[in-house]
Every structure is written in structure tokens, then in C-alpha cells.
Image (tube, rainbow, N blue to C red):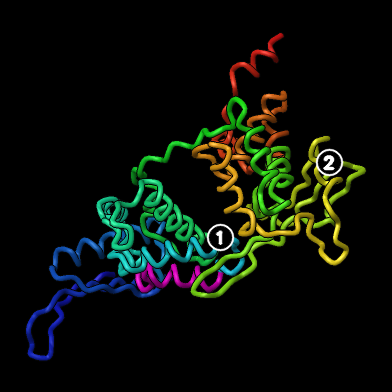
């Protein structure tokens, strides 16, 4: 049974109307509104849901703000994630926005759409530039994942479900299609030969042959607030089997171990490497140690707009050009979905033509 009554302040001034729903078998629900009509509509809605058996207790979603939820996610879930630093920066942005003060029950599709539009027009004080659509897309996607986690794992219901799934996302950035063309590979390797670090050339060849991520091959560190944290240990000799021609990766970006088959060229690279018994790493350097060396090698070779990660792109494309099927390539590269793999794949028509003969 619902009751609607006025609410007064200490000076006996009317400040609103309280709706109170008491129903056997359900917890008492009450909420105060400015107008009596709003209170009556809310009470009827609650009673209707109870009658239909679809009512859910939204106390937790009403008392939990977006900021509260993101901070909980940061403290309980993020420590297990490799991408912690980038996610933390997104959490700060959302928490500082108007959206951070909303309760979860207040989140509507229009709330997320408003955040999207405001962010896309917000000039960064640090760079003086607008954020890219991909950046805003990433922020909304993170919030969406956190909301899904809250509903599925923490039992926090949302009245209208996940509002992030009900809006139009900013346009997705066009995937890079940079590949080595003409004699760029030879020019790059020649430049790597002249690099100060002897590790650069074998690392570049190994990346092209295996499609491994930089963190899977190389020890990688993260630097933040004058602190450094080891993100990955890189490929270890104990995980390499030259006889079986495999390299096992127990820890990867997506959290799933995989074993990468090694081509004859990759085996030759490993066979030629010095093996320090006091260093378990296959490549005795770090990503930070070869990153700038790679940039300088590209400059010496006259190669423009080539990033180290593009070598993974190159490898995946070559696997397809050799005739491997999608699931086979995914098993090598570690892509979880074929859609993700598609972003890294750009095939040369001349190589595909050879397969037709």
C-alpha cells in the first residue's frame, strides 16, 4: 500500500512530498520528490513492478556514485591488470567530470551522451588539443566494462541496464595499415646493423617472424611519478625449445598463455644470440633500451611513419599471405577475436595472386 505525505522543514515550510510503499514480502521503499504528482507516479511504478514480480531493490545503485564504483574497481580489480596505468588515468578523467557525481541509479543514456559530447569539445590544458574520438570511445568503453562488472559480480542492479550500450559511440579510429614496402625491410635491417646496441637487429627480425608483442619479447618497465615498475619479464630461455621450434609465453597481454611456433629464420636468430648463464632473458635488453634505437634506425634508413608495433602487423599479414587460416594466425598472435585480428591484417594483392595458381 502506498502513502503520499508532505515533508516540512523546521520552519514548517513545505519542502516536498514523500512516497512510501509498504508491501508484504518486500522491503519498505520510500523516496521524496518536489511535487506530489511525481511521488504518486513513482509509487505506482514501484507497486506495478512488485505486482509483476520484476521489482528489484535499487538501494545500492542509488547510494553508489560513479566515482565510488570506479574507485572500488581501481582498488579491487585493477591490481591484477597489466594495463593499470592507462586505466587509472581514464578513471581520473571520468571521476573529475560531472558524470562522477551521478548515482548509478541516475545514469541514463542521455547522461552518457552528454559526457561524450562535452569531452569531444573539451580542449586539453596540457596539449591544447581536442581529444580524439578514439580516446573518448576508450573512456566510455571502460565505464561500460565497470558497470557490467558491478551488475554481474557485485550484485548492483541498474534500473535501465547499462546506459553505455544505448548510445552512439564516437567514430572508431581507422586502423593503421602501415606495412614494410619495397626494400624497406632490407634498409631497416642494414640500419639496425649499425645501431649502437647489438640487440636491435635480431629483435626486429624476431618480431617480424613471430608477431610477438614487444612486452612478450622484451623486459618492459613503466615509469610513473618517479617510480618504476616492471611490467613484463620478456621471453625467457627456459620457455624456448629449439628442437620443437616453439616459444612458450606464460603471461600475455590478454591473460592467456600461448605457444608460438618458430620459423627457420626465427630459430636462426635465437641460435646466433649470446647466451649469458646469469641472465634468463633471451634478449638481454629492455624495450626502453631499444625503442629509441629503433627510431634512430628508421631515420637512418629514410623510413617514415613506422612504429615498432607495426612489425606485429607485418607478421600477421605475412602469415595470411603464406596461406594460414584465421584460427591458425590467431593461435600464433594471441588475438582473442577474429575482429581484433582483422585490424592488424592488410594483405598484398600480388601475394594473394600467387595462391590462386
The residue nearer to you, when weighing 3 against 173, is 173
User: Disc 2 versus disc 1: distance between alpha carbons?
Assistant: 31 Å
Residue 13 picture quarter: bottom left
Question: Quick check: can you spot residue 24?
Answer: no
* The one of 227 and 75 positioned closer to us in this rendering: 227
**Left or right for 109, reference 277:** left
Q: Measured from the top left, where is residue 21 in percent x and y? A: 30, 71
Crowdedness near tag 2: few (<14), some (14–19) or many (≥20) residues, C-alpha within 10 Å: some
Location of residue 208 with respect to 357 vertically, above or below: below
Residue drawn at x 23%, y 72% as measured from the top left = 19
Q: Main secondary structure of the magenta part?
A: helix
* 149, above or below 32, in the image: above
Which mark identifies residue 267? 2
Point out the stretch of residues depicted in magenta.
Answer: 62-76
* Residue 35 locus on image (x, y percent): 13, 68
Which disc number belongs to residue 83?
1
In magenta stretch: residue 66: yes
Furthest-right residue in view? 243
Amino acid at each position: 500500500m502506498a502513502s503520499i505525505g508532505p515533508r516540512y522543514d523546521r520552519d514548517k515550510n513545505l519542502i516536498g512530498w514523500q512516497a512510501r510503499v509498504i508491501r508484504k514480502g518486500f522491503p519498505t521503499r520510500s523516496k521524496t520528490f518536489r511535487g506530489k504528482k511525481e511521488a504518486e507516479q513513482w509509487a505506482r511504478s514501484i507497486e506495478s513492478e512488485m505486482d509483476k514480480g520484476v521489482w528489484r531493490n535499487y538501494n545500492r545503485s542509488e547510494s553508489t556514485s560513479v566515482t565510488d564504483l570506479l574507485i572500488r574497481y581501481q582498488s579491487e580489480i585493477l591490481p591484477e591488470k597489466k594495463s593499470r596505468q592507462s586505466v587509472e588515468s581514464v578513471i581520473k578523467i571520468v571521476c573529475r567530470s560531472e558524470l562522477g557525481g551521478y548515482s548509478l541509479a541516475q545514469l541514463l543514456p542521455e547522461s552518457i551522451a552528454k559526457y561524450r559530447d562535452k569531452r569531444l569539445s573539451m580542449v586539453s590544458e596540457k596539449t591544447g588539443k581536442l581529444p580524439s574520438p578514439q580516446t573518448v570511445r576508450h573512456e566510455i568503453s571502460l565505464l561500460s566494462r565497470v558497470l557490467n562488472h558491478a551488475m554481474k559480480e557485485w550484485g548492483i542492479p541498474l534500473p535501465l541496464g547499462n546506459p553505455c550500450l544505448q548510445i552512439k559511440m564516437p567514430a572508431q579510429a581507422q586502423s593503421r595499415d602501415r606495412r614494410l614496402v619495397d626494400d624497406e625491410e632490407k634498409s631497416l635491417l642494414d640500419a639496425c646493423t649499425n645501431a649502437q646496441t647489438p640487440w636491435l637487429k635480431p629483435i626486429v627480425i624476431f618480431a617480424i617472424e613471430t608477431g610477438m608483442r614487444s612486452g612478450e619479447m622484451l623486459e618492459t618497465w613503466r615509469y610513473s611519478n618517479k617510480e618504476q615498475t616492471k611490467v613484463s619479464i620478456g621471453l625467457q630461455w627456459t620457455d624456448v625449445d629449439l628442437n620443437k621450434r616453439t616459444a612458450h609465453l606464460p603471461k600475455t597481454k590478454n591473460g592467456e598463455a600461448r605457444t608460438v611456433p618458430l620459423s627457420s629464420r626465427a630459430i636462426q636468430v635465437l641460435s646466433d644470440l649470446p647466451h649469458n648463464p646469469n641472465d634468463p632473458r633471451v634478449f638481454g635488453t629492455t624495450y626502453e633500451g631499444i625503442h629509441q634505437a629503433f627510431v634512430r634506425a628508421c631515420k637512418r634508413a629514410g623510413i617514415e611513419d613506422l612504429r615498432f608495433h607495426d612489425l606485429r602487423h607485418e607478421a600477421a599479414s605475412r602469415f595470411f599471405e603464406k596461406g594460414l587460416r584465421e584460427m591458425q594466425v590467431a593461435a600464433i598472435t594471441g588475438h582473442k577475436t577474429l575482429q581484433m585480428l582483422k585490424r592488424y591484417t592488410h594483405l598484398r594483392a600480388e601475394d594473394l595472386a600467387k595462391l590462386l595458381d
